Amino acid sequence: QARARLDAIVTLVDAKHVIQHLDEVKPEGAENECVEQVVFADRILLNKTDLVSPEHLEEVEKRLRSINRTGEVIRCERAVVPLDKVLGVRAFDLQRVVDMDPGFLAEEGHEHTHDSSITSVGIQKDGMLDLAKLNKWMSTLLKDKGVDIYRSKGVLSIQGMK
């Protein structure tokens, strides 16, 4: 604990599709993952703001603030955000999380059901990736399936980068 701390929970939301996901009806007992992500966020990156009208942006921000009054909403395009807005901000507050969900730290009896329609995909590849091919593949994936993708993360080894 002396060497590490949770600085902030940062959530990226798609301005064009987030309301649709917030309103999704889930099976009995299942969590709405989108709502959960917004509720616990210390920073909410409102992405793709260039793809929606100012009126829609206002509606989205109002909705996000109704779910999470304390998380800072930061508008962005292509997920470009000044690093000082998301790193070294010391925004995480465990007491706030426990106040929202008293069973959060319980090791037993903290049962919840996730939506079985949400799955994970893992890809592992030996060697280096070609940046142009990766960008083309990601662009196609996001164009075709972007509305269905909640998050992505990875460790990438890109050819020619250190």
Image (cartoon, rainbow, N blue to C red):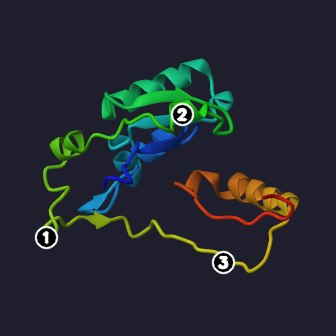
Which quadrant of the rendered structure holds the N terminus? bottom left
Under tag 1, what secondary structure?
loop
4 to the left or right of 155: left
Q: Reading the chain from its start, which is encountered first: label 1 or label 3?
A: 1
- In the rendering, at what x and y percent does residue 143 appear? 72, 52
Element class at badge 3: loop
Image point 61% across, 31% down: which residue?
Answer: 82
Instruction: Report the Cα–Cα distance between label 3 and label 2.
Output: 29 Å
User: Image height check: is 44 above or below 149?
Assistant: above
Specify the label residue 108 is tagged with: 1
Which image quarter: residue 48? Answer: top right
Residue 12, percent across and down?
Answer: 52, 43
Which of the pair 139/108 is nearer the observer?
Answer: 108
The CA distance from mark 1 to mark 3 is 33 Å
- Amino acid of disc 1: Glu
Q: Residues within 10 Å of mark 1 (few under 14, many from 20)?
A: few
Residue at image point 51% right, 70% down: 120
Whole-percent x, y for residue 92 in the image: 33, 41
> Residue 106's spot in the image, x, y percent?
15, 62
Q: CA distance from mark 1 to mark 2?
A: 35 Å
Instruction: Identify the residue under disc 2.
Output: 46
Q: Give the amino acid at mark 2.
A: Leu
Q: Circle 2 sits in a helix, a strand or a loop, which is it?
A: strand
Residue for point 63% across, 39% down = 79
Q: Nearer the viewer, residue 112 or 109?
A: 109
Number of marks drawn: 3
Question: Where 114 falls versus 95 (above or below)?
Answer: below
Say which mark, if any, is on residue 14: none
Label 3 belongs to which residue? 124
User: Is the C terminus in the top left, top right, bottom left or bottom right quadrant?
Assistant: bottom right
Label 2 packing within 10 angstroms: few (<14), some (14-19), many (20+): many
